[in-house]
Amino acid sequence: MAGNTSGKLRKLREILAEVTDLSRAAAVLEWDQETYMPPGGVEGRAEQQSTLHRLAHVRFVSDEVGRLLDDLEGEVASLPHDSYEASLVRVTRRDYQQQIKVPTDLVEDIARAGATARPFWEKARTDNEFSLFAPYLEKNVELNRRLADALGYEKRPYDALIDLYEPALTTRQLEAIFAELRTAIVPLVSDIARHADAIDDRFLHADFAPELQVKYGMQVVTQLGYDLERGRQDISAHPFETSFGPGDTRITTRISPGFFNMCFFGLVHESGHAMYQQGISEEIDRTPLWDGASPGVHESQSRLWENLVGRSQPFWRHFFPSVQSTFPAQLRGVDEEGFYRAVNKSHPSLIRVEADEVTYNLHILLRFELENEMLEGKLKVKDLPEAWNARFKSYLGIDVPNDRDGALQDIHWSGVSFGIFPGYTLGNLIGAQLMEKVRADIPDLDAQIEAGEFAPLLAWLRKNLHQHGRKFTPNELMERITGKPLAAAAWIAYVRRKFGALYGLEKD
């Protein structure tokens, strides 16, 4: 590139680095709020978050950034689409065009509302009383409407919000995806229900010492590839992963002393997110490129490791001896086959993060529909628990006993995060489609997993996906890696094959 262009690019990078630093400082405060902050810090933390988000927003949407992008777009037009320079300008322009539409006071209001609502959501869950959180959710719904109006949309307000997370995806496209999944899942759930006694998982609900659960889970995820020289683990009410740069990517988990799966698979899940962040090229650090391609792509990595690897038979052929030696009393008389079957037991459950692979997407469908209806004014916040319970009964056949396990179970709506739930289902679909390509490129993958060799799989993911960060959209990534657009077919085939074998459905 010409010297003048290089100078402009360097100046753009300087500004983007400042914006990134401010955003990461806010992320550190959010991590602290979820892990160690005392209850009395809520009000001050809300103002701190509001200030940092305002400063980052104002710096990013400055006229200077707009002029630099105008000048650089012509200069990089002749460069390859996947070049660093072209990718940086393209992705920054997309973010810039979105953010200049959002007034600074709305950015402050959203940041303040999220930090303020969080403790009231937590108290409402603890007290099992939705009305304690309802006023804050009403505020967050209104903020999401204001955000959608500011961003603009042609048909439905949800289109504006989903585009923030999954570029170019529309509400109508999501409805079509969920309709296809519902058609495939509901009969499978019914078929499995007829064989409900085929798998015994009672031993997973024994008394597992919390400290041993964490210790064992961390031993496993470090073997998978999570680098603790650049990471750490803590406890929180809702598990999450957060990253402050290439050298600091953290995970949290929650523990149930009476259920093995919650902590173990939570750690595997969050480490999948963390390994994605740790694999992004450091050359694009402190720019908008240094992040996952989208929440859906990010979720593909957590759920690939949690389910496609962590709940596979080769995985437990390797790890069963060590888990049995760690918990000898709880797993006395259990064999590897029985353990593998138990961790894959499918049955409708109240809690999304505890849902099995077959029913999980029905949890997301429910949330997608309800937040869309609240946004469009078709559902009032005060009526959310009733609507939740009725929809849950219809989709999963379960009566919801309380608000804690119903409309209050997720943290997302306390953080003004409408539009992010569909990414969880997209992650399932993307992960399954990627795994088809992995198996084509690594034919002995199962043998490697059974031998405890995870480096080849992680290297494949680093080369084909992780290193690129946000250089490509989700659709571009799928076309580049698999040669096909994103579709539900691979995931549907996977669950039919796996659970058909587990429950002997092919014999029906």
Image: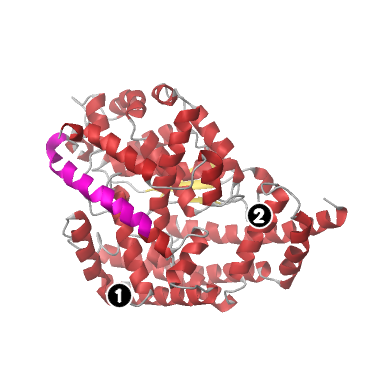
Is 419 positioned to the left or the right of 88 in the image? left
Q: Secondary structure at mark 1?
A: loop
Asked if the magenta segment contains residue 197, the reply would be: yes
Is 361 positioned to the left or the right of 92 in the image? left
Q: Earlier in the sequence, mark 2 or mark 1?
A: 2
Q: Could you say which disc has been placed on residue 127 in the image?
A: none
Mark 2 → mark 1, Cα distance in angstroms: 39 Å
Residue sitting at 64 percent across and 66 percent down? 96
Is 31 positioned to the left or the right of 348 in the image? right
- Which percent across, then down, holds residue 468? 60, 44
Residue bearing mark 2: 287
Residue sitting at 72 percent across and 61 percent down? 15
Write the start and end of the magenta stretch as one range.
176-198
Q: Amino acid at mark 1?
A: Leu
Residue bearing mark 1: 379
**What quarter of the picture does the C terminus occupy?**
top left
Q: Secondary structure at mark 2?
A: loop
Q: Are marks 2 and 1 in contact (CB under 8 Å)?
A: no
Name the foreground residue: 457 vs 35.
457
Is 10 positioned to the left or the right of 377 in the image? right
On the image, which quarter does residue 342 sit in? top left
Observer able to see residue 184: yes
Name the foreground residue: 112 vs 61.
61
- Which percent across, then down, holds residue 40? 43, 68
Name the foreground residue: 47 vs 372.
372
Observer able to see residue 42: no
On the image, which quarter does residue 288 sit in? bottom right
Q: Name the mark nearer the viewer: 2 or 1.
A: 1
Q: Is residue 474 above or below residue 33?
A: above
Q: Amino acid at mark 2?
A: Thr
* Main SS category, magenta section: helix
Q: Is residue 379 above or below residue 181?
A: below
